[in-house]
Image (cartoon, rainbow, N blue to C red):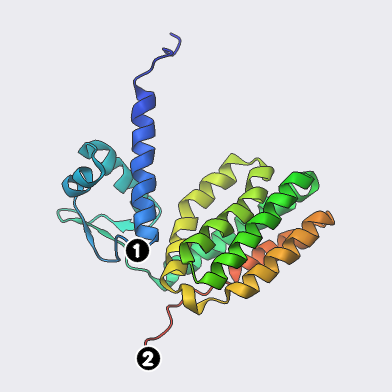
Amino acid sequence: MPIPSSSPLKGRTLLRDDVYRQLREAIVDGTLAPGESLRDGEIAEWLGVSRTPVREALLRLAESGLVVARPGRSTVVAIVEEDAVRSARDVVAAMHELAARVAVPVLTEEELDTMRAANARFTAAIEAGDAHAAVTADDEFHDVLVRAARNSALVGVLEQYTPVLRRAEALRFLSVDRFAAADRHAQLVELCSARDAEGAAQLAFRTWHSLPVIEPAAD
């Protein structure tokens, strides 16, 4: 039987994904703090949706380690733990290494220009101390290589583990040497432009693997 052209599941899928993305971003940017209880009824009211997509979103967030579902008790935002962030960092770095190795030989001049423009926005954001804008520009920069690699499995892995790493970054934005990251971005563009796939892959790995995983101690 062919799938109906007006399948009612389409809207439901979009709603579910929208709820997931909104909750994920709220956790990553700290709107929903570590240890905070997540009650599906309250979240559903906040987002103006039913409880079903909220419950589905919380299950997905639990799979990526952003929330912890406690049987018989409320679901809570996961605490930022060193081991979890280190594991996410290792996986994300390996995926970006792979993306660069595959993408560099097929990058267009337009895509290289997109990377340069994203790094300019990244540099401006760190000069302004704007963590959200910096992370957004950083994502746009690296997404060029990810998209050019045309590997859906790679994209799926990054979607699962990058938010864990981004949340840790957001919590200690001021302690990270972002200007060094901007320099590495520029070097990566040069390697991509020279079609040095291996050099670009190694630098992409180092760029992501250099991110700190331990929260700085309070004074």
Dividing the picture into quadrants, the one containing residue 151 is top right
Q: Nearer the viewer, residue 157 or 17?
A: 17
Q: Secondary structure at mark 1?
A: loop
Residue 24 rendering spot, x and y as whole percentages:
37, 52
Q: Secondary structure at mark 2?
A: loop
Q: Residue at x 49, y 79 (%)?
A: 175
Disc on res. 219:
2
Residue 67 rendering spot, x and y as whole percentages:
31, 57
Residue 44 rendering spot, x and y as whole percentages:
21, 43
Q: Position of 130 compared to 107: left or right?
A: left
Whether residue 31 appears in this view of the structure is yes
Q: Residue furthest right?
A: 194
Q: CA distance from mark 1 to mark 2?
A: 21 Å
Q: Label 1 neighbourhood size at 10 Å, few (<14), some (14-19), many (20+)? A: some
Q: Amino acid at mark 2?
A: Asp
Q: Residue at x 34, y 52 (%)?
A: 62
Circle 1 sits on which residue? Answer: 30
Check the picture and name the quadrant holding the N terminus: top left
Q: Residue at x 57, y 77 (%)?
A: 177
Q: Residue furthest bottom?
A: 219
Q: Tag 2 or tag 1, which sits nearer the N-term?
A: 1
Dividing the picture into quadrants, the one containing residue 137 is bottom right
